[in-house]
Image (cartoon, rainbow, N blue to C red):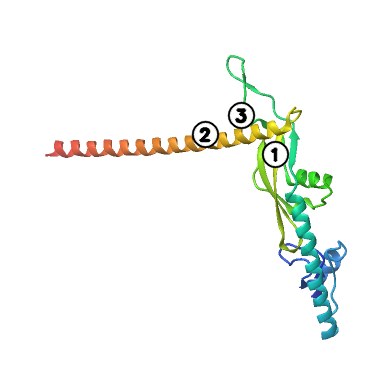
């Protein structure tokens, strides 16, 4: 085993500035060559204490930078233009206009990282989490994991490619999304009520059948 000081957050290991022990191969062949950690010498108590102070200093600096990054990310207004699928047609050949147009493909964490890079914020795509599957236009949420355990929340809009009025289109897709969710909830509630009514009717029929059988026996 070897001791190292983390230069950035490493999942399931520690956060930037932590002094941790890892297997030699993991440290020498991956963490240190990739710039994620540095050697931590433990030849003397004094040196170890110094390296712990160094670790604390690194953590404090990383937290300050992460807070700046969080403020910058959360101050962005991200609008992504995407190609949407062509409208479907009904039996009469008329185009059926969908409230939420479907996308060609999906928007992923790589896309968000690319947008952030365009804004001067370089983030590994693996630190970005898109909270829903983005397959339609609408408003969605993502989060960006920064150093020091800091997390930034980043809302973003996906609108059809070529939209003339971006702000109007943002409002339209967001309203359509809310309406679609409401319709789905109402349909689910109606289905649940229908299922309960059907169950009650079946129970009543079984009771009537039982009563008829009992009278016949008498």
Q: Nearer the viewer, residue 200 or 115?
A: 115
Q: Position of residue 172 (x, y in %)?
A: 64, 31
Q: Residues within 10 Å of mark 1 (few under 14, many from 20)?
A: many
Q: Quadrant of residue 28?
A: bottom right
Residue 103 seen: no
| Quadrant containing the N terminus in the rendered view | bottom right
Residue situated furthest bottom in the rendering: 45
SS state under label 2:
helix
Residue ID at (74%, 43%): 77
Q: CA distance from mark 3 to mark 2?
A: 12 Å
Residue 112 seen: yes
Residue that badge 2 annotates: 183
Q: CA distance from mark 3 to mark 1?
A: 15 Å
Q: Position of residue 153 (x, y in %)?
A: 69, 51
2 or 1: tag closer to the N-terminus: 1
3 or 2: tag closer to the N-terminus: 3
Residue that badge 1 annotates: 157
Q: Relative to 157, say whether 15 is above or below.
A: below
Q: Nearer the viewer, residue 119 or 91?
A: 119
Q: Residues within 10 Å of mark 3 (few under 14, many from 20)?
A: some
Residue that badge 3 annotates: 99
């Amino acid at each position: 085993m070897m001791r190292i000081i983390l230069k950035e957050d490493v999942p399931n290991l520690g956060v930037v500035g932590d002094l941790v022990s890892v297997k030699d191969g993991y440290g020498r062949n991956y963490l240190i060559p990739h710039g994620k950690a540095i050697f931590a010498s433990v030849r003397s108590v004094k040196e170890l204490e110094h390296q712990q102070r160094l670790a604390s200093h690194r953590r404090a600096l990383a937290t300050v930078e992460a807070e700046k990054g969080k403020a910058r990310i959360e101050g962005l207004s991200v609008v992504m233009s995407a190609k949407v699928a062509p409208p479907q047609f009904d039996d009469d050949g008329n185009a059926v206009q969908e409230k939420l147009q479907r996308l060609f493909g999906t928007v992923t964490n790589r896309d968000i990282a690319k947008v952030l890079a365009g804004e001067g914020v370089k983030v590994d795509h693996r630190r970005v989490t898109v909270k829903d599957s983005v397959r339609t236009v609408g408003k969605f949420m993502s989060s960006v994991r920064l150093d020091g355990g800091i997390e930034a929340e980043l809302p973003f809009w996906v609108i059809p490619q070529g939209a003339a009025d971006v702000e109007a289109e943002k409002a339209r897709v967001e309203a359509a999304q809310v309406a679609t969710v409401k319709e789905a909830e109402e349909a689910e509630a109606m289905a649940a009520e229908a299922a309960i009514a059907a169950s009650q009717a079946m129970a009543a029929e079984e009771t009537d059948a039982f009563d008829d059988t009992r009278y016949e026996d008498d």
